[in-house]
Amino acid sequence: MSVSTEPAKLDQLEQEWGERPSLHSWFSTVDHKRIGRRYMVTAGIFFIIAGLDAMIMRTQLARPNATVLSPEEYDQLFTMHGTAMIFLFSTPMFFGFGNFLVPLMIGARDMAFPRLNAFGYWVFAFAGIVMFSSQLVGKAPDGGWFGYVPLTDKPYSSGINLDVYSLGLLFLGVSTTIGAINFIVTALKMRAPGMSLNRVPLFVWAIVATSFMVIFALPALNVANAMLFLDRRFGAHFFDPAHGGNTLLWQHLFWIFGHPDVYIIVMPALGIVSAVLPAFCRRGVVAYPLLVLSIVTISIISFGVWVHHMFATGLPQLSYSFFSAASTLITIPSGIQIFAWLATMLRGRIVVRTPFLFLVGFIVTFVLGGFTGVMFAITAFDQQVTDSYFVVAHFHYVLFGGAVFPMLAGIYFWLPKITGKMYAERLSRWAFWLIFLGFNTTFFPMHISGLLGMPRRIYSYPGDLGWDVWNLISTIGAYILAAGLLLVLIGVIHAVRRGAPAEDDPWGGDTLEWGTASPPPPYNFAVVPPVHGLHPMWDERTTTALATGKVLEGHQAMTTSELDGQVEGTIEMPEESLLPLAAALAILVVVLGLLWSWYWMAGVGALFVFGTVARWLWPPERSPEEAGVA
Amino acid sequence: MARRGPLAGVRRCALMACGLLLVGAAAGCSREAQSTLHASGDGARRIEGLWWLMFWISMAIFAEVMVLLGWALWRRRRAGARVRGGDALGMVTVLGVVAPLVILVVVYGLGLRDLDALAAPPQKASVTVDVMGHQWWWEIHYPDRAGAVTANEMHIPVGESVLVRLRMADVQHSFWVPNLMPKTDLIAGKLNKTWLRTDRAGSYRAQCAEYCGQQHAFMALLVVAEPRASFDAWLARTAQPATTTLTAAQARGKAVFEQSSCASCHTVRGTSAVGTVGPDLTTIGSRWSLGAGAAPNDAGHLAGWVVNSQTIKPGNAMPPQPVSAQDLPALLSYLQTLK
Amino acid sequence: MTAVVEEATEPRALASEMPAGRTTGWWGMVMFVTTEATVFAALLGSYFYIRFQSGQWPPPGIEDPKLTKVVIMTALLLPSSVPVMWAERGIRKGQRWRLRAGLTITLVLGLGFLAMQAWEYSEDLKKHTLTTDAYSSLFYTITGFHGFHVAVGLLMVGWLLAASLRGSFGYRRHERVRLTAIYWHFVDLVWVAIFLSLYLSPRL
């Protein structure tokens, strides 16, 4: 806790930075902590909906020839399950973590662009609402999350479903890009003095690497979706072979985005593992430089492997050999991280609490998923089992194991910091075991049914192919998994409402967020913390400075140099504003106008976008002296 | 639970996993149906071997990781347990870089060798089959034998290589016979090729493996491998137009067929029905299933299919047919003569 | 007046003036331009992908894109970066007239570019439209998307001009000019890539 010797200044900071709770403030907040929480809660709600989609699917698949769902309903469910889990849950949830934690971990008072941050959240929320609303009216996208043409092009999909898909993702892409830019600039410019690059926490490295991947990968998806929309709505021929187009173009563009995307999903989770582990091993993660190198290497190589999603399409063998090699190689940096974490545990002294249990669960499941991943990198094997339940098993092991387990570890780890309340350890352990058991029961049998020839994306199957028992086991597992996740939800709600108040630093953590109150005050740090090493909160120089240093007054934040973290100056941070919400609403109007073919409405919306942005960035009136006139 | 530590539970799960897999493998062995683990074809057998190699390597490394994890957890209980500094660079480099690199290079090399083997059949193909993928059925032609057209069923001679040429009519599909060969997609505007070869006679179920719309789940195909002589006989029978002598009822059924909407979509060679929208029905009587795996091929299901196939395979292109109650038995008896 | 000066030079006000080194806004614009450049890269990549799978290019029935108008467009757009740089250098020294003049010239040149593009389109659309062939779909989407970027750039320049007329900029405050300049240069560079890819390379 930063106990400053100047309480009056703390009050003043509270005044400058505090947002009085009110309806207006709810819509106009620019505080990264509130926005981060919002991302997490909204992503959590989307997770529940997408999870329920899966539960219904598993109920349908429990028995052969079941009639719980019609084929159309099933197709919408599996499309929305995948699309929502990937786009509306996982990345936004991690952006939520990043939003809350990155400024705190680097000793900053907020993100570099607080209003842009708020804008990003609103766009995400609206995009999610648009896409899920389509499910309510039975017009949800039904072409799979990967939307291959020609199936998703006219004439094979003529309803509005796939327009929701392409426009919805284009809309969401605005939020993801903006979030990525914000993280990069924040991490580059707003770090505490002394936090040179080699002292940046691994979680922040992970978030920044993720953001760079977003910058370079998302354009491919946006181009693909724009082309699909133009083909469908305006009769373009990008994907129409009869008029010079090419259906494989979609797959290339989609997977040039799609493969980096899976690392975009998993990378922040790996960052969480590195952030949570030290507290439960009582030492920092080993081989920091190797881990940073791994993070960067994975990010770069992830752009060179996409054709492994197209191994069955009949491309030249030479091309396949190259992509197979790259896909095999990318295992190495991931392996480095796993063994570094194991070495950390071996060299530390483990303390078992719920967050640590989820890290162990992560190691077991992610490693298993990694094995099948290597198998898929081998072209010949991929050609036999791709598009079967074997691949469904693989990606759930790496996505649930690799992203959701660390996410749950992070939820329990940072719950005290975010809410100021502690969770109940016993309940959370029950949740862990149910989840671990349920997860493996659900997805392990899918390896078997896939090897036994069961294709994926099928709404039902005959009873004489030997798949029945595995599907039934999977469904039972799904219910166990759901029960475990329900316990997590109950535990979190219970903690928030009735949990024991948490200390500032219940775990003895090493990074700067533990140097603030639980929850942190609106200004995060009264004193800008000087950083002298990788573990500032285990360093007396920093903790003393936090307690007795000079307060940075005003609505200001510190900026430092990109590489060495040397002080450059302070910048004025923006106040609350409704403009981010207004801009997001304006884009919503554009999207709905395009969706419903009311192009005049889209045009009006575009004007409003320009108007709000112009107002937002309008410079203040300045006197000639203030501006500096010759 | 906390006292025993998480390791016990983890170990249990790992053992359970191995057990399940072995059981699954055993289960796969006793069936002929769709499976990669009871491979009959040359291509699939290569991959099955590769699979088991990779499986056991994975199990070995998994055991290694579990041992390290277990040791770290056990260590915390020891009296002298203290935090050690240092970066364990040696361990991380050896276990995380060197060992994996060696294993991966070997596996990659084997995989490349297998990919090369899959590229072309061991001997030159003696039979060619043209496959056209439709939503949701397979059109099969034997180009070297005039008139040999069928649907959702393919016969190949045992012990000989068969070239399969893949085209699609509407959306992307994928041709997958797990027992015989890894899959190959059917792509718009592109001619993809694969091959099949097996030394073991049998019927191998295949299925479309690329999501192609509502009835992707029921776009199956039977590949029948039989000795050369019976293959030739089958091919000859298939190529022959429908020329069986018909009873009166069957003749009436034929008339119904030719004069109603059936003929506008279906062909029965040797009659005036030359529609090309739906599958060729010249050998419908002897097919393994109706609707590409949607229903068994017996009188009852055939009746249901003809009257309203939407109840069996909703969304398929065949609308309900207004066949009167008197005509239906005749029509069915006619269709069943088409072998 | 004195009070204003005092307030303006108070540590707090100066503190929120442009700090040393690159600003957050600079990095933000650079990152934004990077991702937009990647969009164009994906579009041009798609163009070449389709092109190298096709035989004749442009396909039969569509002629090579005419160069005359496009050369004039290039002659309008590329040099328009110069007045922007001149304007930026000027305001760094506090010369507001230079800022306003430079921005105005850029605005005129940019509008000229768009007018010529509209003229080019009106002629082309008689021969082929978005729905004629994949070639035309790509042609109109790529050039149209770029034109949209030019239009947005002109809105930014116009907005900047309006703000400068209001007296918001000087040697202490001109970050927005710098950022708009970065965007404008980016738009120019993309045009070079498009010109080379779509207009020149089919003739090689």
Image: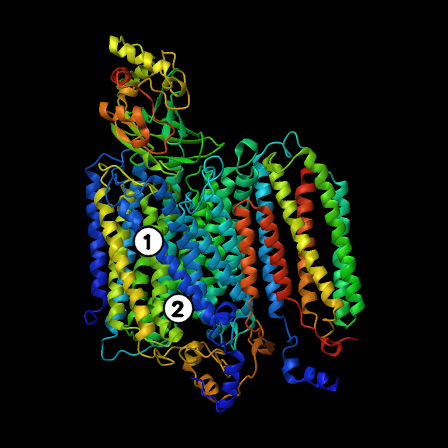
In the visual, does B121 lie left or right of C142? Answer: left
Q: Which residue is mark 1?
A: A52
How far across and how far down the image is residue C46, in percent? 57, 43
Q: Chain of mark 2?
A: A
SS label for mark 1: helix
Amino acid type for the residue under numbered disc 2: Ser
Residue C47: x percent and y percent? 60, 42
Q: Residue at x 58, y 45 (%)?
A: C45
Above/below status of B249 relative to A310:
above
Q: Residue visible at 44% across and 66% down?
A: A38
Residue placed furthest toward the bottom: A5
Marks 1 and 2, how far apart in space? 31 Å
Q: Residues within 10 Å of mark 1 (few under 14, many from 20)?
A: some
| Mark carried by residue A274 | 2
Q: Regarding mark 2 in the picture, which secondary structure is present there?
A: helix
Residue type highlighted by circle 1 = Leu
Q: Position of residue C144 (x, y in %)?
A: 65, 46
